[in-house]
Structure formats: C-alpha cells, structure tokens
Image: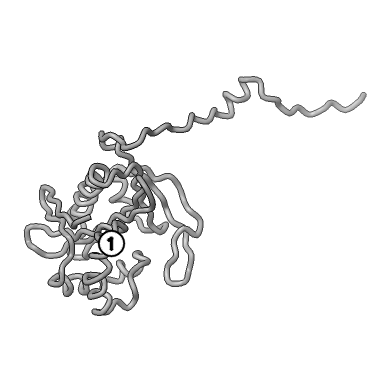
Amino acid sequence: MDPVALTTERLLLRPVRPDDTEAVLAAAQDPAIQRWISSFPSPYLREHAETFIGRTAPDGWADDSMYTLAAFPPSGELAGMLSVVTHGPGHGEIGYWAAREHRGRGYITEAASAVARWAFTALSVDRLEWRAEVGNDASRAVAERVGFTVEGVLRAGVGSRGVRRDSWVGSLLPSDLGLPSSAPYLPAPARPSEAKAQAGGDCQWHPLSSPS
C-alpha cells in the first residue's frame, strides 16, 4: 500500500521521513519508552532511528506488514508514533507511544481512534488487538478510552530483552465504533451460570448418611 496521511481535530498523522530522525532519537531516550516498548533497543542509538525511518517503516507500508504513522500537533513537534501490524486476513494489532513532553493532552487517544477507524475501513480489519505488558497503565488507559475491551492476561505474552512477561490483551471490533465488518461475526453463545446449570437438572453431590 502507498503510504497515507490522516488528520484529526488536532493532529496530522503521516509516515515518518528522514527529517524526523532527530525527533525520534530524542523521544526514544525516555526511560519509560525503553521500559515498556519491547521492540525498542536500549540504549537507543542514532543508527536505530535511521534504520527505522529509512528502512523498517517504509518497508512495512510496501509489503503491507506494518503501517506506521507519526503524530504531529499544530506546533509541528513529534507527539508520538502509532503502528498497525497485520497478523493475517482481517486481523491487526495496534501499538503506540507518546513523547514525554506531549503526554497528558489526549493526543495518542485521538490518534489511536483515527487509526482504528482507518484500519477498519481501509484495511478491512475485523479485529484490532491491543497488547501491553501488565503494569503499563498508561497504555491500557488509552486503549480503554478508544473503546477496546480488555479480554484478559496472556501468561508470558510479551518478550522484553530476553525475559518473558505477562501481557494484557484487548480487542476492538468495527461494530464497537458503529462500523460494518468485512466478514460476518457470529459470537459464541453465553455460558450459563452455575445457578442456571443446577436449575436445569445437573447432578448435585449430597453426603451419604451413616448407617444406623
């Protein structure tokens, strides 16, 4: 797919380009980003920023494996980065980070909402996943504000610098945003509660009386 740009009320979301190298390098020095984003090398060097901007991000668009957009408010400073990674037909995963000086303004929530809608409409994604290491409360707060349903904890769900850690997983469906799916969705029937199961005639255990 050819790279695209999106706009929101306050942001321009566009593919990264060579003149973003310094901003990406500076943002990546934040210890919080290096702690929670498992794909970030630590230490994060200029060569890492140059490789990401010059090869990794453009290649993702070219082979439809990862769609990366940088978020810029009216000031023109880099506020954060978002990516949608494809895991197969109709299945994508969103990731994001915010530059330290731009946190607390709702930029990433606004950007993630726009990117999710774009994924559903332009990429025919029917399930958009979000994952974050358990404890990354800021990432979870963004996901929940966007509308993701947190589905549970994946044991050893994320690898971080040679260590496996538990991760949260959540999902957003087109219907959550009032959008149609590209394929019909048939939810599993709700499991009956224990009380209903017993009322339906399930066997129950009773202690036997001692012989007199």
* Residue 139 spot, x, y in % from top left: 31, 55
Q: Which residue is mark 1?
A: 60
Give the residue displayed 18% in from the left and 73% down from the top: 21
Q: Secondary structure at mark 1?
A: helix
Q: Quadrant of residue 125?
A: top left
Q: Residue furthest right?
A: 212
Give the residue displayed 35% in from the left and 36% down from the top: 183
Q: Nearer the viewer, residue 204 or 60?
A: 60
Q: Quadrant of the N terminus?
A: bottom left
Give the residue displayed 10% in from the left and 51% down from the top: 10
Residue 119, relative to residue 23: is it above or below? above
Give the residue displayed 26% in from the left and 57% down from the top: 67
Q: Nearer the viewer, residue 58 or 194?
A: 58
* Residue 127 spot, x, y in % from top left: 35, 44
Residue 151, relative to residue 105: is it above or below? above
For label 1, count other residues whose C-alpha is less than 10 Å away and answer few (under 14), some (14-19) or many (20+): some
Q: How many marks?
A: 1
- On the rendered structure, is 12 left or right of 148? left
Q: Quadrant of residue 135?
A: bottom left
- On the rendered structure, is 71 left or right of 145? left
Q: Quadrant of the C terminus?
A: top right
- Give the residue type that dot 1 points to: Gly
Residue 113, relative to residue 161: is it above or below? above
Q: Quadrant of residue 61?
A: bottom left
Colour convention: one colour
* Residue 147 spot, x, y in % from top left: 30, 42
Residue 200, relative to residue 14: is it above or below? above
* Residue 166 spot, x, y in % from top left: 47, 58
